[in-house]
Image: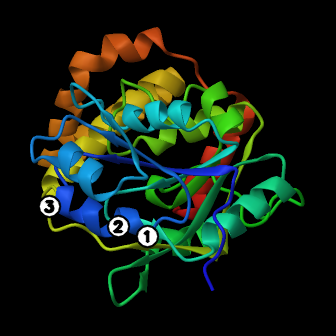
Amino acid sequence: MTTPAPSDVTVVVMSRDRRDDLLATLPRHEAPVVLVDNASTDGTVEAVRAACLGVTVVPLPENAGSYARTIGVQRAGTEFVAFADDDSWWAPGDLARAAAIMRAHPRLAVLNARILVGPEERLDPTCAEMAGSPLGTPPDLPGPALLGFIACGAMVRTEAFLAVGGFDRVVRFPGEEERLSLDLAAAGWGMAYVDEVTVHHHPSPRRAAPDQRRTAIWRSRVLTAVMRQPAPEVGRVVLRALRTGTAERRGLLRALPDVPAALRSRRPVPVAVREQLRVLAGSGS
């Protein structure tokens, strides 16, 4: 029996030059889909419009990084938005299940599902860390509290997401979840890991090399620190980048042109959020 699509959920997918992955995954989504295309050059827009008639395609003239998801959320107009990558999809029935959990927990801004990787369905190691979060499980959340999430396996409350600005144009991708998580926590919203909801992720063969990805993550880490951390922590992040390795130093260098934009958006998080960060750092999470 087919599970009815939840009326208050839209799936937002951002993509760039992953036409074949999209044609395989988009039909799996059990809710309306908004695809925001980051200026693909492989015919993605035309192919999806021809093959997936129910998908709303939003082509961008340039690569906006993760800000494309914010555009998608604004376009969706539903109470909740489930994010998916071009190589991931929510398990049958679990969009409706996640939406029900969100409705039952009004402080919950982000639900991070259990993510199973590849045909062998290995648990994503980050999910194991989330399940053991040292922040515990507050009574008003459906699972262990988080101060971060994995975008391809998350459902967000649109009101909360947009109130803190969504994903921004400065941090871009990957590592875009950190700044958004800090802002949600600062505003009093909750994030939780819920392992009764599942997302499947079959990593695309068209992926950046590990060193390139580390460089991009450290670029995001540096810029997020500039935007939201007190000055001593910004210094510590910079020192770690300098001391860790070539990819990390390259990330620091790539962050430098965007530091003025990060400073214009600077708003250090309150003490309570910094204390949560210390708890997580002390546990090794």
Name the residue beneath numbered marker 2.
25
Name the residue beneath numbered marker 1.
28
Asked whether the residues under the numbered discs 1 and 2 touch, taking CB atoms below 8 Å apart as contact, a structural biologist would say yes
Q: Quadrant of the N terminus?
A: bottom right
Residue 257's disc is: none
> Horizontal placement of 186 versus 183: left or right?
right
> Horizontal placement of 63 versus 190: left or right?
left
- What residue is rendered at 30% in x and 35% in y? 65
Say which of marks 2 and 3 sits in front: 2
Counting from the top left corner in percent of width and height, residue 169 is at 37, 24
Helix, strand or loop at mark 1: helix
Helix, strand or loop at mark 2: helix
* Residue 264 visible in the shown view: yes
Q: Closest to the observer: 34 or 136?
A: 34
Q: Closest to the observer: 25 or 54?
A: 54
Name the residue beneath numbered marker 3.
206
- What residue is rendered at 63% in x and 64% in y? 5
For label 2, the crowd category at 10 Å Cα-Cα, with few meaning under 14, some 14 to 19 and many 20 or more, is some
